[in-house]
Image (cartoon, rainbow, N blue to C red):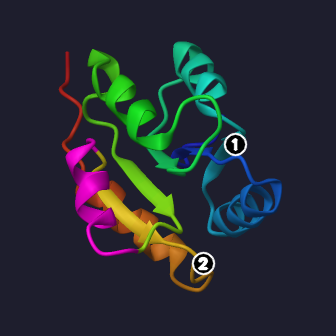
Amino acid sequence: MSDAPLILYVEDNPDNRLLVYRVLRAEGFNVETVPDGPSGLEFVENHIPDLILMDINLPKIDGYTMTARLKQRQELVNVPIIALTANVMKGDREKTIAAGCDGYIQKPINVDRLGDQIRAFLSNRPQKKAR
């Protein structure tokens, strides 16, 4: 198993999922993608990602609700959830932060900067407590 950080990307658009997957894999990350909130909740039952990228406009469970549910889970408290969204109207960034997101990346993504943005969010997360 690789020591590379595990990124979970929750995104309903298959083109966006593939693009982010390819960019982050090329940057050396392990990446899992899921198409909706319920699939994301199922994934975290068995895996604790190092970071979660969250689309906001999702079917079934929107990204705001999904983020709130994930942040209630003790094992995910220190996992950064980053909104990756096309919602760029005034107040959208603040709404994602109020929902519990730890950061915000605007779509369309800058493929040349995405890896560095993810590394910055990972370096700022609270460290896991040693047992």
Residue type at tag 2: Pro
Residue type at tag 1: Thr
Query: Which label sits in the foreground, 2 or 1?
Result: 2
For the residue carrying disc 2, how many other residues have a C-alpha within 10 Å: few (<14), some (14-19), or many (20+)?
A: few
Numbered label tally: 2
Choose between 75 and 11: the one closer to the eye: 11
Callout 1 secondary element: strand
Residue located 60% across and 55% down the image: 29
For the residue carrying disc 1, how many other residues have a C-alpha within 10 Å: few (<14), some (14-19), or many (20+)?
A: many
39 up-or-down from 56: above or below: above
Q: Which residue is mark 1?
A: 33
Choose between 33 and 130: the one closer to the eye: 33
N-term mark: 2 or 1: 1
State the residue lying farthest toward the front: 90
On whether residue 97 falls in the magenta region, the answer is: yes
Q: Quadrant of residue 122?
A: bottom left
Residue located 26% across and 67% down the image: 91
In the picture, measured across the screen, residue 99 lies left or right of residue 86, that is: left
Q: Position of residue 68 (x, y in %)?
A: 32, 30
Residue located 79% across and 59% down the image: 18
> Do the residues bearing badges 2 and 1 touch, measured as CB atoms within 8 Å?
no
Q: Position of residue 70 (x, y in %)?
A: 38, 26
Give the magenta part as a residue range: 89-100
Quarter of the C terminus within the rendering: top left
Q: Position of residue 121 (x, y in %)?
A: 33, 60
91 up-or-down from 54: above or below: below
Q: Which residue is mark 2?
A: 108
